[in-house]
Amino acid sequence: AQRVTQPEKLLSVFKGAPVELKCNYSYSGSPELFWYVQYSRQRLQLLLRHISRESIKGFTADLNKGETSFHLKKPFAQEEDSAMYYCALSGGSYIPTFGRGTSLIVHP
Amino acid sequence: KAGVTQTPRYLIKTRGQQVTLSCSPISGHRSVSWYQQTPGQGLQFLFEYFSETQRNKGNFPGRFSGRQFSNSRSEMNVSTLELGDSALYLCASSPESLYGYTFGSGTRLTVV
């Protein structure tokens, strides 16, 4: 069965520090991986898709099939990055699966 | 472009009752998925509809059902409500799953 693991429930950093939100997955096949973000009192929204290889709000994520990881990174955290981040996996006939989320707090 | 709209925002129901939740996707999005979000289990996939057909289904009992209309609007129904069905129910639409979802604000269901 496919699985998405976000090992950290909470990540606390200071403004300007690098950020890495970890996501590991288990899936047999070609996964479609996503990062979603939920800011306080807002709806869940798509941040990144691995197929796009894009950078959004300074965040990037690289799919590492060897390590089955899709970590989210940003070189310099900003206070407005404070939010809940979810890694998600879908593909083929498998049911879409979300990780439990990591709460990122960026201190001034 | 209007976002994903879910109605109602809040519901309180009694055990044993049934409930219907509604979702209007973004115009042009043919895929509509439903999720249950609880503090204990996180986000769990209920089902996905695409062009009025259920394309995928999560591991929920048959009390949870859904449908999609020709205009892509979707409804989900929960019959014989249990206390454990109390949750935030999220609807998400997409042109196709590989593009990722646009989520609605959710319907907060409380079963008493």
Image (cartoon, helix red, strand yellow):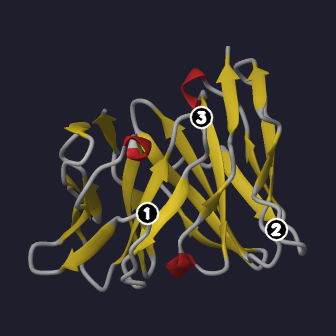
Q: Amino acid at mark 1?
A: Lys
Q: Nearer the viewer, residue A21 or A92?
A: A21
Label 3 secondary element: loop
> Which residue appears at 39% of the width and 31% of the height?
B40
Q: Quadrant of residue B75?
A: bottom right
* x and y percentages locating residue A39 in the rendered image: 51, 42
Q: Gap in Å between the C-alphas at discs 3 and 2? A: 21 Å
What residue is rendered at 9% in x and 80% in y? A66
* Mark 2 secondary-structure assignment: loop
Q: Mark 3 Cα within 10 Å, few/some/many (few <14, many 20+)?
A: few
Marks 3, 1 in one chain:
yes
Do the residues indicated by labels 3 and 2 lie within the same chain of the protein?
no
Tell if the residue under mark 2 belongs to the same chain as the one under mark 1: no
Answer above or below: position of B20 versus A98: above
Residue nearer the viewer, B93 or B65: B93
Cα gap from disc 3 to disc 1, whole angstroms? 19 Å
Residue type at the position of mark 2: Lys
